[in-house]
Image (tube, grey):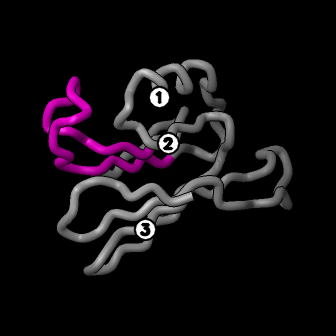
């Protein structure tokens, strides 16, 4: 699943039974955030801690997602900006992950 949320940038494995983290992984979720909206860092961190299927959740670093897709895999990277207040702000990859074709579930990257 690909989605957009103005407050956070989660990457997650979707389980057949969301209440059971040992149930089979049936899909992956990658959500892009907006570059300028303010995040809810404490709330997002709490939600991520309570949900073991969430591999990455960030609302403090603002940025955008890059997705490369071919027949073999999807590679996603969350690019964060040092500050949204300057056009020349440094940009870096703060998280990445891969989804192999035919295999549900994100393989955690950096």
Tell me where residue 80 appears, x and y as whole percent: 68, 52
Separation (CA) of disc 3 from disc 1? 22 Å
Look at 31% across and 44% down and name the residue there. Answer: 13
Instruction: Report how many numbered discs are placed on residues in the image.
Output: 3
Q: How far, Cα to Cα, is label 2 from label 1?
A: 8 Å
Q: Residue 85, which numbered label? A: none
Q: In this view, does 84 lie to the left or right of 22?
A: right
Please provide percent x and percent y for residue 94. 64, 54
Give the residue at x 26% y 32%: 21
Describe the element under mark 1 as helix, strand or loop: helix
- Would residue 14 appear left or right of 11 to someone viewing this image? left
Say left or right for 94 vs 19: right
Q: Does the magenta stretch include residue 38?
A: no
Q: Mark 1 points at which residue?
A: 48
Mark 1 residue crowding within 10 angstroms, few (<14) / some (14–19) / many (20+) = some
- Is 18 magenta? The answer is yes
Of residues 89 and 78, the one nearer the viewer is: 78
At mark 3, the secondary structure is strand
Evaluate if marks 2 and 1 touch, with contact meaning CB atoms under 8 Å apart. yes
Residue 53 in which image quadrant: top left
Residue at mark 3: 75
Distance, label 3 to label 2, CA atoms, is 15 Å
- Per the image, the residue denoted by label 2 is 56
9 relative to 106, above or below = above
Which residue sits at x=26%, y=80%? 71
Question: Which of the image's four quarters has the C terminus?
Answer: bottom right
Q: In this view, does 15 lie above or below 46?
A: below
Mark earlier in primary sequence (3, 2): 2
Q: Give the range drawn in magenta.
A: 11-32
Nearest the viewer among 17 and 4 is: 17
Displayed quadrant of residue 88:
bottom right
């Amino acid at each position: 699943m690909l989605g957009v949320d103005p407050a956070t940038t989660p990457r997650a494995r979707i389980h057949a039974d969301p209440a059971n983290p040992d149930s089979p992984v049936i899909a992956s979720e990658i959500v892009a955030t907006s570059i300028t909206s303010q995040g809810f860092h404490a709330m997002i961190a709490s939600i991520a801690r309570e949900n073991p299927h969430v591999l990455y959740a960030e609302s403090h670093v603002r940025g955008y997602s890059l997705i490369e897709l071919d027949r073999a895999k999807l590679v996603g990277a969350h690019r964060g900006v040092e500050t949204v207040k300057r056009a020349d702000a440094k940009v870096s990859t703060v998280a990445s992950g891969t989804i192999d074709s035919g295999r549900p579930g994100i393989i955690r990257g950096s």
